Image: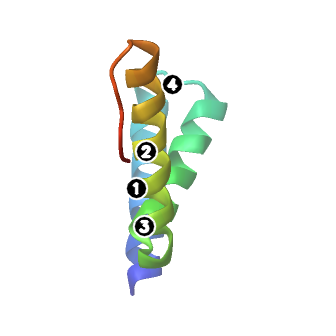
Amino acid sequence: MVAVIAISLGVIFFFINFAYGADIVSNLIFCIGILVANIPEGLQITVTVCMALTAKKMAAKSVLVKNL
């Protein structure tokens, strides 16, 4: 059931982004990200990657990042 919902949301957002004019490669990456984020096993990985990217952006602005 979770997989069906995740795939449905991925396809819906794929077509919505395509209608707004997003290019196909970034649109496909976004769709895969939604699929991974909606499946509980990939949730921890997605959160960790998002936090690491945010910490990297903050470090570029000379913000002290102690913990993720």
Of the pair 43 and 56, the residue shown nearer to us: 56
Q: Are marks 3 and 2 in contact (CB under 8 Å)?
A: no
Please tell me whether mark 1 sits on a helix, a strand or a loop. Answer: helix
Question: On the image, numbered disc 2 is attached to which residue?
Answer: 50
Residue 31 x/y as whole percent: 52, 49
Front: mark 4 or 1: 1
- Disc 2 crowd, CA 10 A, few/some/many (<14, 14-19, 20+): few
Nearer-N-terminus badge (2/4): 4
User: Is the Cβ of the residue at disc 1 closer than 8 Å to that at disc 3?
Assistant: yes
Q: Give the percent coordinates (x, y) of residue 52.
A: 47, 42
Q: Is residue 35 above or below residue 56?
A: below
Residue designated by label 3: 43
Residue drawn at x 49%, y 32% is 18
Amino acid residing under circle 4: Ala
Mark 2 residue element: helix
Contact, CB < 8 Å: mark 2 with mark 1? yes
Q: Nearer the viewer, mark 3 or mark 4?
A: 3
From the image, tell me which residue sits under label 1. Answer: 47
Circle on res. 22? 4
Marker count (numbered): 4
Q: Pointer 4: residues within 10 angstroms few (<14), some, or many (20+)?
A: some
Assign a secondary structure to mark 4. Answer: loop
